[in-house]
Each structure stands twice: as C-alpha cells, then as structure tokens.
Image: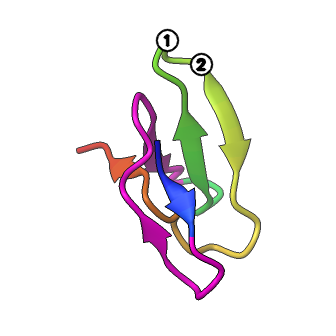
Amino acid sequence: MATNTGKGFRRGSVKGRSQTKNPLTRIWTKRASNGQFMDGKADGSPFKGVRRER
C-alpha cells in the first residue's frame, strides 16, 4: 500500500484503484476495484499515486 511521506509525495502506488477525469465537470474521480466511483477531487488536479484509466 502507498504511504505518505509528509514531504509532498507518496511512496508506492495505491493498489486496486484507478482514476478518470469526468469530461463534463472536469473533476478527477477515483474508482474502487469493484468499479464503484468513490471520491472526486475538488481542486482539479489528479490524485497522487492512483493509476489513470485510458
């Protein structure tokens, strides 16, 4: 599992999750391993350590 270092970066990757950008709202949305949408990022930047879907 990924761990935060407290220095602005994350060591490792978050397993079993992915992220995609919603084209309508332009918000990055995190998706769980079962396909459910979990969380949206308010500031517009992508989540750290979460792989991106294509």
Assign a secondary structure to mark 1: loop
**For the magenta stretch, what is the residue range?**
5-23
Residue that protrudes farthest toward the bottom in the picture: 7
The quadrant of the rendering that contains the C terminus is top left
Q: Could you tell me if residue 47 is visible in this image?
A: no
Q: Residues within 10 Å of mark 2 (few under 14, many from 20)?
A: few
Q: Is residue 15 above or below residue 32?
A: below
The quadrant in which residue 5 appears is bottom right
Amino acid type at image mark 1: Asn
Identify the residue at image location x=71%, y=42%: 39
The residue that mark 1 highlights is 34
Distance between the alpha carbons at the discs numbered 2 and 1: 6 Å
Question: Looking at this view, is 45 or 15 the one in front?
Answer: 15
Q: Is residue 31 above or below residue 45?
A: above
Residue that protrudes farthest toward the left in the picture: 54
Identify the residue at image location x=36%, y=57%: 12
Q: Is residue 40 magenta?
A: no
The residue that mark 2 highlights is 36
Q: Residues within 10 Å of mark 1 (few under 14, many from 20)?
A: few
The quadrant in which residue 26 appears is bottom right
Question: Looking at this view, is 9 or 51 the one in front?
Answer: 9
Residues at badges 2 and 1 in contact (C-beta under 8 Å)?
yes
